[in-house]
Amino acid sequence: MINPRFLSAVSLSGSKLSARIVARGAAGVRSFSVDHGYIVSSESTVPAEGLLALLVSDKRLEEGPAARLGKAAVKRGVAPELLLLEEKLIQPVEVVGALEKLAVMRFRAAMLGEGQAAAAAGGVGRGTIRLHLGALLLEQFRALPPEEVQQYLGVTSGALTLHADQDVLGALRLQPAELRAARQTRIPLGGDVQNERAVRLGGALLALGLATWHP
């Protein structure tokens, strides 16, 4: 189920030059640093969402070395990726790819999990990744059933009116069907199959503050 508190925090962070989103749920705490509309770093206290756990899961690192590096990172008070690079167990480009994958995993978990979320201005340090916040949010909406999006919207009828310019829409990397829907400027919230992509797009744009709902 979509967490409206998290989406509200995402929308708020997108309106600031830099912000930090913090989502707290039963599984743990996830946070995202946003700079000029891009996620530049993410953190999570959920064990399965750690860098070393991901590398082991992807079979890019054995469990033994991962456990050793995890203990060493805690002892030295440094990020695991620093030790991975020091020991040349992974290439810098692989680190960036893994951190981006983690950010997407954490973002989706925060968006679809229960709990509180908030965004505050500032608090953005030096980042190693660069994921467009709006494009990432839309990517998550694409995978959802339209019924779940309509439940998030709280309506089953009416329409969403878009008010995003072409530059903003271009940054979202819309697919052809989404581009056609965006050109209509008004997305009906009916339940027909042909409108599924439009409903997902409308939900994402509403969450980003780029659309308004009208009965």
Image: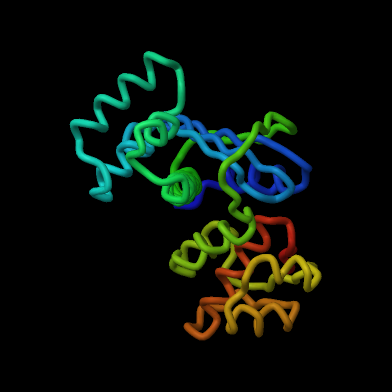
Which of the two residues, 90 or 23, is positioned nearer the viewer here?
90
Relative vertical location of residue 126 with respect to residue 215 in this rendering, above or below = above
Residue drawn at x 74%, y 47% is 36
Give x and y (percent) for residue 173: 62, 70
Count the marks: 0
Q: On screen, 13 above or below 64? A: below
Q: Nearer the viewer, residue 101 or 75?
A: 75
Q: Quadrant of the C terminus?
A: bottom right
In this view, the residue in front, 200 or 14, is 14
Q: From the viewer's perspective, is 24 left or right of 87?
A: right
> Which residue occupies 71% across, 71% down?
170
Q: Nearer the viewer, residue 55 or 180?
A: 55
Which residue sits at x=57%, y=72%? Answer: 199
Q: How is the image coloured?
A: rainbow
State the residue at coordinates (57%, 57%): 137
Q: Is residue 40 above or below residue 135?
A: above
Percent across and percent down for residue 67 are 24, 27
Quarter-of-image position of residue 77: top left
Question: Residue 53 placed where, x, y %?
Answer: 30, 38
**Place of residue 83 in the rendered image (x, y in percent of width and height, measured from the top left):** 39, 29
In-image side of 76 versus 133 (left or right): left
Return the residue found at the far top.
Answer: 75
